[in-house]
Image (tube, helix red, strand yellow):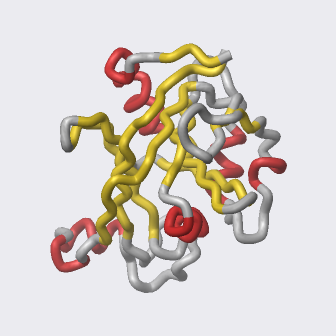
Amino acid sequence: MKRKIQIWDYANEIMSALQKGVLLTTKAGEQVNTMTISWGTLGIEWSTPIFTVFVRENRFTRQLLEKNPEFTINIPYGEFEKKILGICGTKTGRDTDKIKEAGLTLESSEVISVPAIRELPLTLECRVSYKQEQDPKAITEENNRNFYPQDVDGSFHGANRDYHTAYYGEIVAAYIIE
């Protein structure tokens, strides 16, 4: 069962969880992938609620978003296995079925084609309404140095030389899986 929620009633929970890690789930064709993120924004643009995610150029998630511009944000609510965030934050979906390895249960979504995840039940269904690649020249020298070191591989899961694309996702449904 899904209990519909008003996003703004849960804004504190969403942003607090984001600092520790939430899942960004994508799907293209029959392939579902999820990755841990800790960068994102919740806000309003074009008179609609938006969740913006930032995905590095080399990520498998980016490839799926380019094929299907929809995603879910899966947020811990209550107790959950913290190893989920570790598995989904350090492995690539190119060669690992993270859904299976992390023991995740996919739930049908309400509006979009990308599933929710039962184990992280606070769910935002998002449809991309805008995307923008970062301009390295517009990023401060300090942030370029700290977050985009050019002496590492583009697939490294920590500090990584690849820049991000911002995907603005219009929130089209929000609920808690019960």
Quadrant hosting residue 92: bottom right
Outermost residue toward the front?
Answer: 111
Q: Nearer the viewer, residue 122 or 153?
A: 122
x, y percent for residue 26: 59, 53
Say how many tags the image has.
0
Residue 115, visible in the rendered structure? yes
Residue 157, visible in the rendered structure? no
Q: Nearer the viewer, residue 166 or 3?
A: 3
Residue located 38% across and 23% down the image: 7
Q: Is residue 162 left or right of residue 121?
A: left
Quadrant hosting residue 46: top left
Q: Is residue 133 left or right of residue 105?
A: left
Above or below residue 101? Residue 150 is below
Above or below residue 122? Residue 156 is below
x, y percent for residue 177: 64, 21
Q: Nearer the viewer, residue 89 or 24?
A: 24
Q: Is residue 138 left or right of residue 115?
A: left
Above or below residue 91? Residue 162 is below
Image quarter where the N terminus lies is top right
Residue located 42% across and 23% down the image: 13
Residue located 55% across and 26% down the image: 122
x, y percent for residue 159: 46, 67
Q: Is residue 6 left or right of residue 111?
A: left
x, y percent for residue 139: 20, 70
